[in-house]
């Protein structure tokens, strides 16, 4: 999955990718391509390198699911270095989706399902607190993001999903509901107003899995075979024959 | 890395693979091929499928490190279904190492470093407690592994490492020292006498990284470049040029 933020936190204990690794262990590799601070404009040329072209794909494992989670950096205020106008953000997401969906694309991958995730809401007061101490490229006393702006970019993701026929994990709504629809309620979910604590990631994970179950049930972890048999099922059998045919990906 | 046990726990919060994922995020993919309950005899035909043959490798990412962690199942008592005699265990490990090291091997991979890990000590009393409740294939009141047996298989791994010139992460010794060289001390490290708590995994992780630093410093996480620049280094630059050359693996 490609994400533009929280890369370190997501692979940490209780992070989204750690939870996915656990759920899909021995069934499907979870490959993180997350780049803290990146926006959709920078993502596009990277995606062209990260995804294999059709011509190279015969030798590579199938990418069964491409999950794209962007927005929090694009939604920075106009004038801020990460800002990307909403319309361009939506166009970049559409371009990413069509990279694998469009038969004319050099990266066309009919075997690759696509999923979009909306950015989370932002807790501005908490975020300003963080920026005043650890803001990049330099600490600052004013916010570079606002609640309504992030909400608008979440809506942009939903619109792209609807237009392109791609399922959307509505992280924004899930977290906003969990916060009791109060910005103060987000403080329990976020570390710093924008990046999540494990409790927040668990909400995202649950929504992610629910979306897979609804739209791509064939790749829900309960519906995927385990690579190689359970060891007790090898006892007393011809292990050379049993271990010949498996879905373990070649490295 | 290939492991024969604790696969679910190792990708869980605080597990070895979760810790490695975090350390190597954006630098090197950590791919787990762990199969709970498996021994070295079953591992060999699987390794032939999991590793790519020379002829296919041009299209695949380089496996920079192959870490093999086996022994706890091989060390089950003679007559138990997972048991593999010590001499055969050592031969299987040598065969696995030579699969990538031997120029005559179809899987020869001169770019792949190899690492061996010794099995941990076993806390028999704790393990029997686990077996009496959740033993597989059925609960039982007697142990299927013993302290001296596990120690002997750890020694076998060290011998293979010495003979083949492969660095060894001596998990057995690290945990035994941490337990104050008392079997009772292992109870703080293990969940059930054989599988580790996060505190145990952290000890393994530290030893793993120390071994890499000593023998393969070029792949220590501090010495690997981050895929794609830090976002602040893109500001005001030609992002199309900056984002063209990177080490992010093609999927």
Image (cartoon, coloured by chain):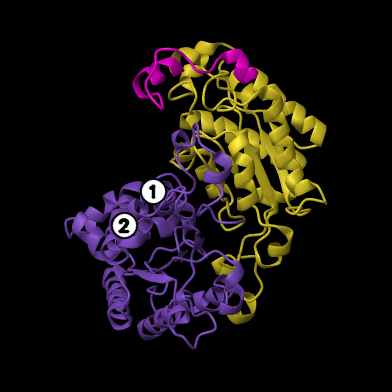
Chain colours: A yellow, B purple
Residue in the picture at 29% in, 54% down: B206
Q: Is residue A156 left or right of residue A123?
A: right
Q: Chain of mark 2?
A: B
Residue in the picture at 61% in, 63% down: A227
Q: Is residue A221 above or below residue A202?
A: below
Regarding residue A215, the answer to whether it shows in the image is: yes
Crowdedness of circle 2 by 10 Å Cα count: few (<14), some, many (20+)? some
Residue B156 at x, y = what percent?
A: 31, 78
Q: Is B62 contained in the magenta span?
A: no
Q: Nearer the viewer, residue B85 or A134?
A: A134
Q: Is A129 contained in the magenta span?
A: yes
Q: Is residue B51 above or below residue A176?
A: below
Q: Secondary structure at mark 2?
A: helix
Residue in the picture at 73% in, 41% down: A97
Q: Residue furthest bottom?
A: B104
Q: Is residue B80 left or right of residue B173?
A: right
Residue A12 at x, y = what percent?
A: 44, 41
Q: Nearer the viewer, residue B174 or B234?
A: B234
Residue in the picture at 55% in, 14% down: A146
Q: Nearer the viewer, residue B201 or B223?
A: B223
Residue A222 at x, y = what percent?
A: 67, 50
Residue B100 at x, y = what percent?
A: 46, 78
Q: Residue furthest left?
A: B180
Q: Quarter of the image holding residue B13?
A: top left
Q: Is residue A117 above or below residue B71?
A: above
Circles 1, 2 touching at the beta carbon (< 8 Å): yes
Q: Is residue A153 above or below residue A44?
A: above
**Circle 1 sits on which residue?**
B23
Q: Chain of mark 1?
A: B
**Circle 2 sits on which residue?**
B209
State which region is magenta: A127-151
């Amino acid at each position: 999955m490609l994400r533009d933020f929280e890369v370190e936190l997501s692979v940490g204990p209780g992070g989204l990718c750690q939870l996915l690794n656990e759920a899909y262990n021995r069934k499907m590799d979870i490959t993180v391509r997350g780049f803290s601070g990146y926006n959709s404009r920078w993502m596009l040329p990277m995606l062209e390198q990260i995804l294999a072209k059709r011509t190279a794909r015969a030798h590579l494992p199938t990418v069964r699911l491409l999950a794209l989670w962007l927005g929090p950096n694009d939604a920075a205020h106009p004038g801020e270095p990460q800002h990307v106008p909403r319309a361009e953000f939506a166009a970049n997401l559409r371009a990413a989706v069509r990279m694998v969906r469009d038969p004319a694309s050099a990266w066309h991958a009919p075997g690759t399902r696509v999923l979009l995730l909306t950015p989370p809401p932002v807790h501005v007061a908490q975020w300003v607190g963080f920026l005043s101490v650890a803001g990049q490229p330099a600490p600052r006393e004013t916010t570079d993001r606002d609640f309504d702006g992030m909400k608008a970019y979440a809506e942009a993701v939903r619109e792209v999903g609807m237009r392109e026929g791609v399922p959307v994990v509505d992280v924004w709504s899930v977290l906003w509901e969990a916060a009791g629809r109060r910005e103060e309620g987000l403080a329990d979910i976020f570390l710093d107003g924008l990046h999540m604590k494990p409790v927040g990631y668990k909400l995202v994970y649950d929504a992610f899995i629910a979306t897979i179950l609804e739209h791509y049930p064939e790749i829900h972890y309960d519906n995927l075979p385990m690579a190689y048999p359970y060891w007790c099922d090898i006892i007393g059998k011809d292990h050379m024959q049993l271990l010949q045919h498996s879905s373990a990906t070649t490295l």
